[in-house]
Image: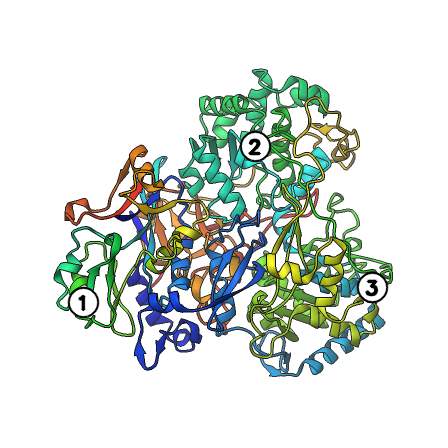
Amino acid sequence: MGKKLNRREFIKIAGMGAGGLAVASSFLKPVSLFGQSVSREKLIASTFSEATPTYCEICFWKCAGWVHKKDGRPWKIVGNPDDTHSNGRFCPRGTGGLGAYTDPDRLKTPLIRVEKRGKQVFKEATWDEAFDYIAEKMNGIKEKYGPECMALFTHGSGGGYFKNLIKAYGSNNIAAPSYAQCRGPRAEAYLLTYGEGIGSPERTDIENTKCLVLIGSHIGENMHNGQVQEFTRAHMNGATVITVDPRFSTAASKSKYWLPIKPATDLALLLAWINVIIEEELYDKEYVKKYTYGFEALKKAVKGNTPEWAYPITTIKPHIIRETAREMAAAAPAVIIHPGRHVTWYGDDTQRVRAGAILNALLGSWGRRGGFYAPSKAHVPKPEHPPYPKPQKGWRDAFPDKYPLANLALSSGICDATIPSTTDACSIKGWIVYGTNLMQTLPQPQKTIKAIQNLELLVAIDIMPSEITGWADVVLPECTYLERYDDLRISQGRVPSIALRAPAFEPQYNTKPAYWMAVQLAKKLGLSAYFPYEKIEDYLEYRLKAVGSSLAEMKKIGVKNLPLEQELYFLNGEDYEFATPSGKIELYSDTLAEHGFDPIPRYTAHEEPQEGYYRLLYGRAPMHSFGRTTNNPLLTELKLENEVWIHPKVAREWGIENGEYIRLENQDKVVSNKVKAKVTERIRHDCVYMVHGFGHTQKQMRRSLNRGASDTQLITRVNVDPIMGGTGMRVNFVTFRKEVA
Amino acid sequence: MRYAMAIDTKRCVGCADCVVACQTENNVPEGFCRDWIVEETIGAFPELQLEIRSERCNHCDDSPCVRCCPTGASHYEEGGVVLVNHDECIGCKACIASCPYDARFVHPEGYVDKCTFCIHRVREGKNPACVEVCPTHAMIFGDLDDRNSEISKALRTRKHKTLIPEAGTDPHVFYLL
């Protein structure tokens, strides 16, 4: 069985997408000089190229690179060798970033809705008209309900300017789906256990590890560049990789052990590993004694969680559980139980991730080479502005007794607080949505629509006409990251660094950078004092000067690595006070106990699919960033649609052929768009899998319209994590519907 | 001098960065590609193996495409690199039919196109664009006649194979196993 991305498929694709092809940008057209064809190689060798520094916006890894032009026209983007996120090598999405610029389906001018919300009837507007409309509505909401009734959803570099704006306006309802729909449980689990989070890029010392344990993390398919590079290095250096996944992922194929676990039982496996490590006295005794709190309670709690106990739950044989636990112990402390990234699966996710955090502590890997390092971040001051007004209420007031340990606003919570109910103390009336397609990022799209129908204002700021822009009252078209400055990239890593994004091209159409939009809107709202610099160049110059650099210097180097301020690892026997209530790593959490949660993770069984239904799992493909890239002309050439992975036995039962288009129907009778069946041995029989981000319904995205199926559409129910409000989404079951020819 | 490429199937994650890097570097028209990814699954659940390969023109020593070209447009350049001279190509497609690797296509301008090992970059002392971009360093390009080149060392120390060796074309893209 082979999958070949070949020319023939491409030709077929090109034939189907004729509309897109006809308006393809000029730089992809064949080059012809003086009326005759010239050898491309000769042409490339003879031409002059110029380069502008950028950092990538196609995903959150934000690799720094150079945008090259040739004869004044866009040519290619390559990595910056000084950048620790990419080490000079971009991933396919970064390399294909030019497609975001050339996409003919981009938003081109501000739009104001003229008919019923969601009908997608807009009139083209001037920027001034659009800002006036928004300002009038925002002033009205402030007067009628209070400024706290505005909310911001954000994802991406430009979100910071709108955060500043909405805080200045008087609201703290700022949410990113990357918390409650993705990393939130990880952040809280590690905060509870170690008093510190994992952050991004992750502080995992993969390149020096001797044993890497992946629980559902499909590194290589999630193309988080630096992490994939480290993974390969560790693998080639002979590190033992243990992959726990119902699917034979790319990472599983590089692993010494693949544990094809029954979905939703990972916590049982983790507890069994903890049991073996304790019972066989394989834990780091000195480390546990010096740094941890609650060992005896833990020992008692996991007493019954033997491999034999876990076997019928997980389907992983007891001797494999023991053998893999011993492999981890043999590698300790250079061992990583990877905390994962997208971890909102089953609703007990904080507890599951915490079990991994506890296992890491027993093996002594936190603060150790090959385990978890202490990341550094550059300190770059921002210009001063007046203090923000203090909001009188917030999203949390809508759920007085719920999610006590959520440290960030819940996007799903804000959505819920927008649907009026008698208990709501803070009912949201206006949304600004920056760079996130809520129709695909929030589960339960039917609920999102209900919330939207209750709004008095919905502003969407985006590059592409995604599903959410179709629901907006005002659409503000942003230019791509290749056409704008943005704030500096200041992210954590082994070395503190800053990176600059400068515009390589002039904005196309009537599009503008987010910074400019926020400044203009602030003017209309009388909040200009919060934006001391009208021009972003001056703002950047201020920040760069504070760290001894300048815009001129950064334009030449793109990335600046600053001196390391702290050790990466604990020194031998170092005393260390963790930022937890006990000052130690909390194997037992009093905080959790006080709030009525299990102080030590405990396994409870999750609902299983009925006969004829299969658990819906979803994930990533290396050439796409969710739904954000599925219309990118360069990246659609690599993957135009998703497939649903089905085990051959299941396919036989249903008479489904490999490559056949079928539909999925979930437990709530929601039927998907048609999607190609990938009949493969690489998945268990009790689940199906698809790549997230496909199945777009937005007609203006001509390449991605109706390509593949949307997992989000089928996620009509969630298990909410009671600790922090994360929405567990792998709790939906699907069955098959054959397409009638 | 004999140029060749080795692709490390242990390192490759099949991300297709090589494909998109080639497309931007070489202005490959939309709907076509000079390199592509193949994923091959071997075995049955749960005893499985996966081989991921980045494939392209094999720049064979005994190339049927060069032999069958009526105008001499398909020819060998320095280091054994097989190229198509666009001005001499009449688009007859004989080479496309002869290639066991399905590595060639008709460019919308009328000539046959394929991987050039990025000879324009190699002549400047750089690696081909696909090799240069590969995030996992899964690809090696170099001169087989130089015993100390990275590719010579890799082929001496690592188990490797070529694709469809039975076609007898003496391909020069190797897969490290």
Mark 2 secondary-structure assignment: strand
Q: Amino acid at mark 1?
A: Lys
Say the numbered circle drawn on residue A57: none
Judging depth in this view, the residue of A294 and A593 nearest the camera is A294
Observer-side mark, 1 or 2, equals 1
Judging depth in this view, the residue of A61 and B140 nearest the camera is B140
Q: Residue at x 25, y 58 (%)?
A: B103
Q: In the drawing, does residue A609 fall left or right of residue A293? A: left
Pointer 2 chain: A
Residue at numbered disc 3: A170
Separation (CA) of disc 1 from disc 2 = 54 Å
Q: Residues within 10 Å of mark 1 (few under 14, many from 20)?
A: some
Say the numbered circle drawn on residue B93: 1
Observer-side mark, 3 or 2, equals 2
Task: Determine if residue A420 is in view.
Answer: no
Mark 1 vs mark 2: tell me if same chain: no
Judging depth in this view, the residue of A597 and A25 nearest the camera is A25
Say the numbered circle drawn on residue A336: 2
Q: Amino acid at mark 3?
A: Gly
Query: Could you tell me residue A664's position as x and y percent?
Result: 43, 56
Query: Could you tell me residue A513's position as x and y percent?
Result: 65, 70
Q: Amino acid at mark 2?
A: Ile
Q: Residues within 10 Å of mark 2 (few under 14, many from 20)?
A: many
Separation (CA) of disc 3 from disc 2 = 43 Å
Query: Could you tell me residue A220's position as x and y percent?
Result: 46, 45
Mark 3 secondary-structure assignment: loop
Q: Residue at x 62, y 68 (%)?
A: A484
Separation (CA) of disc 1 from disc 3 = 68 Å
Question: Mark 2 or mark 3, which is nearer the start of the sequence?
Answer: 3
The answer to whether the residues at label 1 and label 3 have Cβ atoms under 8 Å apart is no
Task: Determine if residue A514 is in view.
Answer: yes
